[in-house]
Amino acid sequence: MTLPPAASLHDPAESVYNRWRQLNQWLSAHQTLWRPAPFTDPRPAWTVPYRDLAHDIEGLSDSDCEFYDDHPDQLAERLSGLLPSLGERQSLVALPAMTDQQETVAASTLPETRATDMPGRKRLQAGAFAAAVKPLTGPVLDWCCGKGHLARTLAAQCSVPVTGLEWDDALVMDGNRLARRFNDDVTLHRQDVMALDVAVPEGVHGVALHACGDLHRRLIRKATGGNAARVSFSPCCYHLTATTDYRPLSARVNGNREVLALNRSELRLAVQETVTAPARVRAETAWVSGWRLGFDGLQRALRGEDDYLPVPSHPARLAGEDFETFCRWAADKKGLTLPAGIDFHYWQSVGERRFSQVRRHELVRHLFRRPLELWLVLDYTLYLEEQGYEVRLGTFCDRQLTPRNILIDAVRGGGEPLLRQ
Ligand SMILES: C[S@@+](CC[C@H](N)C(=O)[O-])C[C@H]1O[C@@H](n2cnc3c(N)ncnc32)[C@H](O)[C@@H]1O
């Protein structure tokens, strides 16, 4: 399969819809590689038709795996020797950086002395977001604002009032206390943004930093429905949604007969990245995943059924125990009786071997995380265009600061909406 290379979104000759169509086609053409989850499926079907590819990644060392998981562009390049269409990935996911001046970002970031209660990464993310959306002209509404870290960062940049909506009372109280202490023109209100009566008033600039799934989609709809002057947001956790299957927002996407169907667990793939996780967390995830896979092998043998049995999230204390304790807890959760004489060492080593293989197969699946994310973001962009907004799309910070680094910045245009829904 060969597609024409995707042009930069800066290129006025390329429409957002073209990019979306290219991604849709490319993702559809490769769906056998990303739909099956290797964790639940020990022998993903693609390993048969793509035997060379499977052989190549199964031969990677642990340190190669770590490197390629953090550098999917380079993995795609390596594997394009075996499957040339993977070479198109890089141009399909390319996005412009929305700020290229380090000084602008530094000047837009709250100094540490004013960043009380603000985790270091959050302070830098809010500063980078502010730098990308400057200058601000109208009143700002921070959607799902938490303690108002973005709200306070934006208020320090401009002389417009910033209000915030957040449903957690304690965060609202803390945020208002911080705003008063530092004399910021910021007021947070306790509000469930999913409530029927919530509104984004006309002329307001709605912003959101990492509002999850339905929360950011609610902002898009409320902002366009209320004639907001501008809406700028960095989406995350696309899979946190009340619906089982993804419902595209854009009329053009919905009208395309080849549109991908995505369920909630496939949406989750778009955000499965550990690039900012500390080494200790990665190591713990690895050994507990090995235990889960060991238990999976054991339960298949005990039940005589070659099917994955979903085990709920475990309490944190279990990670400090051992494999046998984990299996007893998991068996109890699933109503399974463990007979006497189980060779737990054997099943633990089965789990370790499976983990090593799953990790390699997942590398291939992970190549599709960013393309899926961009597919979703382009749907949002198209919807905003259809509602009469001019949209800038790009990254507001490096992915080491947060892998959720896409910013959609939509300004209401002068004309009528193209397609009001
Ligand atoms: C991932 S946090 C982001 C917080 C903030 N924007 C930031 O970057 O620090 C999402 C926030 O949404 C809030 N939230 C979740 N559901 C909400 C709802 N239905 N209405 C209002 N806020 C909600 C949570 O309490 C949380 O503070």
Image (cartoon, rainbow, N blue to C red):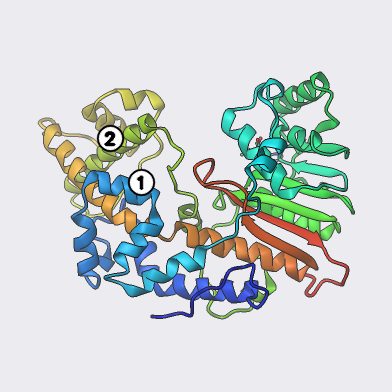
Side of 40 relative to 351 (left or right): right
**Which residue, given by chain and number where applicable, does mark 1 sit on?**
310
Residue displayed at 55% across by 65% down: 375
Residue 75 lies in what quarter of the image? bottom left
Describe the element under mark 1 as helix, strand or loop: loop
Please provide percent x and percent y for residue 288: 30, 35
**Which residue, given by chain and number where applicable, does mark 2 sit on?**
287
Residue nearer the viewer, 68 or 377: 68
Describe the element under mark 2 as helix, strand or loop: helix
The answer, for residue 342, to whether it is visible in the render is no
Q: Amino acid at mark 1?
A: Pro
Q: Quadrant of the C terminus?
A: bottom right
User: Going from the N terminus, do you reach mark 1 or mark 2 first?
Assistant: 2
Cβ at disc 2 under 8 Å from ligand 1: no
Above or below — where is 135 with respect to 319?
below
Side of 297 relative to 13 (left or right): left
Cβ atoms under marks 1 and 2 closer than 8 Å: no
Q: Amino acid at mark 2?
A: Trp
* Ligand 1 image-quadrant field: top right
Please provide percent x and percent y for residue 198: 81, 46
Residue nearer the viewer, 200 or 98: 98
Above or below — where is 329 with respect to 144?
above
- Crowding near the residue tagged with mark 2, few <14, some 14–19, many ≥20 C-alpha atoms within 10 Å: some
Side of 124 relative to 341 (left or right): right
Please provide percent x and percent y for residue 315: 40, 28
Residue displayed at 71% across by 40% down: 144
